[in-house]
Amino acid sequence: MEHTNKSDVLRQGVIVFVFLAALTALEFFVAIEIGSTALLAMIAFVKVGLVLYYYMHIYRLNIQDDNLDRHSFQYKLGTSRIGLWLFLLSDAFIFGGLFISRFNLLGLTALPLSSDSQFTALTITSVLLLSSFFMNRAEVSMEHGDRKGFIFGISLTILLGLVFLAGVITVEWPSAINAGVTPSSNAAGAVFFIMTGMHAFHVLTGVIFLSIVLRNGLRGLYSPEKHWAVESATTYWHFVDVVWLFFYPALYLIGKLI
Amino acid sequence: MSLHGIVMIIGILLGVAGLMNYLVPMLIGAQDMAFPRLNAFSYWVAPPAAVLLLSTLLFGGFDTCWTGYPPLSERAPLGMQMFFLGVAVAGWASILGGLNLLASVLRMRAKGMTPFRMPIFVWAAIATSLISTTATQLIGLSFQMVMFQRLFGMGFFDSEKGGNPILFQHLFWFYSHPAVYVFVLPGLGIISELMPVFARKPLFGYRFVAMSSLGIALVGFLVWAHHMFVSGMNPYLRIPFMFSTLLVAVPTGVKFFSWVSTLWKGKIEAPTPMLFVIGGVVVFLLGGLSGPPNATVATDLHLQNTYWIVGHFHDTMFGGYIFPFFAAIYYWFPKVTGRRMNEALGKIHFWIMTPSFLTLTLLMMRVGLLGMRRRVADYDPALGFDNYHLVMTIAAYLIAISVLIFLYNIFVSIKHGEVATGNVWNSRSPEWQVPSPMPVHNYDRPFEVIGEPYDYGLPGSVYVKFEDKKSKSH
């Protein structure tokens, strides 16, 4: 738990979000003007680094509490954090496998999608980034005892998550199918649908987690000292965002220009 | 094709999970795993997994053996689907169990138990769990992709649609090669754990042995494509994978040096557990030495898919898992039940199993070199090794009989074995310092680690010191 000034932390969240938005715009520009995969990869890694550090607080894994009582909440919190991050590490291997399959099957060539879907993808990517921003605000609010800010932030996150899901399922998928990319058409279609589908499934899981956390939050089950459910759901949500930061360029930006 | 492969793999995984789940909390002085409910979940997904795997028999079986290679697996009957689902469900147990164990070891060690004062088995368990937590996802993914190919016609592995069947093999072996280290690392850990007890000498090179477990796990992630030398992947990939595979011999060799040096000039006692430890070392040495010919591309092109591979594989599995597993049961049985297993029956078990097993696998390698293919139902008698096959069959039945003797021994000893409530093997480990069978609250008085774990034979040295009953732990 950081004992810093709330407005400082919130301002930090805003600055990080501005950086992420700028990098996303730069990424799009790089894709259409330069078309360099190496640059895209570098930008993706910078974005992921920002999210890992400022939104997911990976430094919290540096736990030093050997002198704490083993049965105390604080000690168990450290154990839970390790468990959660190990789970995310494990999950990352699935997405890594999908990511590698994409390059194994298609090399660095673009998926045969229409330029419309490229713009929708940029939109839903922004929606997901924005949801991460509000998720961060919700968590910071909870840490500083601002219940209203927490409820507001988490509700908005759920809403944006649902917008993202709707964007993928009702806009992206039909537009891909119209362009002739169906799950069974060819390897590119298979890759597109399993990658977006697997990610959307994780977003859906995250929305469900967050809804439960929202319900419990409305009932007042969390306090600034004890809110592991909030922290874990937050971390998971950002993780799903991190996955998309890699999937988005791999599916929409590589090799393709409008 | 038979269920032998997958049943043995799941059986071994369950055995590994059981060993680690029982031993690790006890060895590190914890009351339970870090996440007990998650642990219960990992345990209770075993029945649904077993049901799914057995249901393959009702739905036309699966024709591909446990590897499930497409394109055959995308065309096989419904049993294939059940097989994929069963493996996926069993995979949850592996992933969540490994995660749980890592968290337990990181967070729940006794006071004073620094990383290099942990019992050596715990290091093996860490390495195993690192593999099972991460790599297991890839076998799940590869099977899921075949399932989607079957269900929705997604063309990942269908070359007509621009897919690539070799991709499946990459994804599949990225788990399934490290998986063999999941099988053997705990066994090798048990060998290192038990050997100093019966040689009454410190474990030679503790730190190197600890690091060699991690080394095997790490290198294990870099060798998967050596299963694919003849399957049509880019030939230039063979060379790096050949070298990385040969590199596995280095950390494994460290373990052998440690074992031999631990035995050197020790006051060796040889009750049943020690017999199985020595047997395991010998058999695993045979398995290890028959490995490099498979790793070397030039010889592997000849040996691939022959009985040589079957012999090599069973040597490593028996030496690295089955023998240490029996050793562990004979060794910790008094801890679990408060009674010893029958020593005479144990020795009979060992002396029937070891020679027949060596006969079996050496002959397997022999007929493999003569041209016997694996995964075939029949062979041409003109090849001239039907007598070998007869001997192998007899040897296999002898192994089965010896295992029946072992099971009989367990059932008899649970009720009528010699009562043993104290430190039967004169061990320094914490679990033997409390009465057997293990009390429900295992360590009533918490202990503190104040010395090196394996300083057997050094006068005055102690590993653990129990706190006085009066003083509370916190």
Image (cartoon, grey):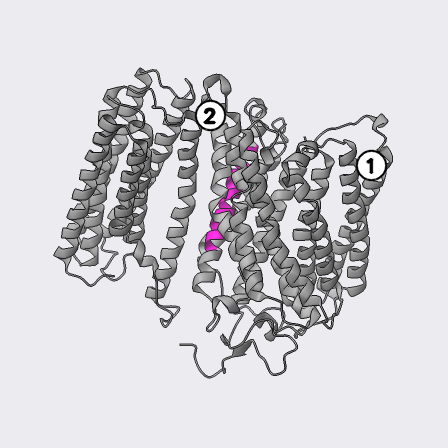
Secondary-structure class at tag 2? loop
Q: Residue at x 33, y 18 (%)?
A: A177
Q: Nearer the viewer, residue B117 or B344?
A: B117
Quarter of the figure that contains the C terminus of chain B: bottom left
Please identify the quarter of the rendering in which residue A195 is found.
top left
Residue A100 magenta: no
| Residue ID for mark 1 | B389
**Quick one: quadrant of the N terminus of chain B?**
top right
Question: Are discs 1 and 2 located on one and the same chain?
Answer: yes
Amino acid marked by disc 1 = His
Residue B34 shows in the view: no
Given residues B440 and B366, the one toward you in this image is B366
Give the residues drawn in magenta, as a range. Answer: B83-100
Q: Mark 1 falls on what kind of element?
A: helix
Query: Is residue B84 shown in magenta?
Result: yes
Residue corresponding to mark 2: B156
Query: Could you give the CA–CA distance between mark 1 and mark 2, rounded to whole angstroms?
Result: 41 Å
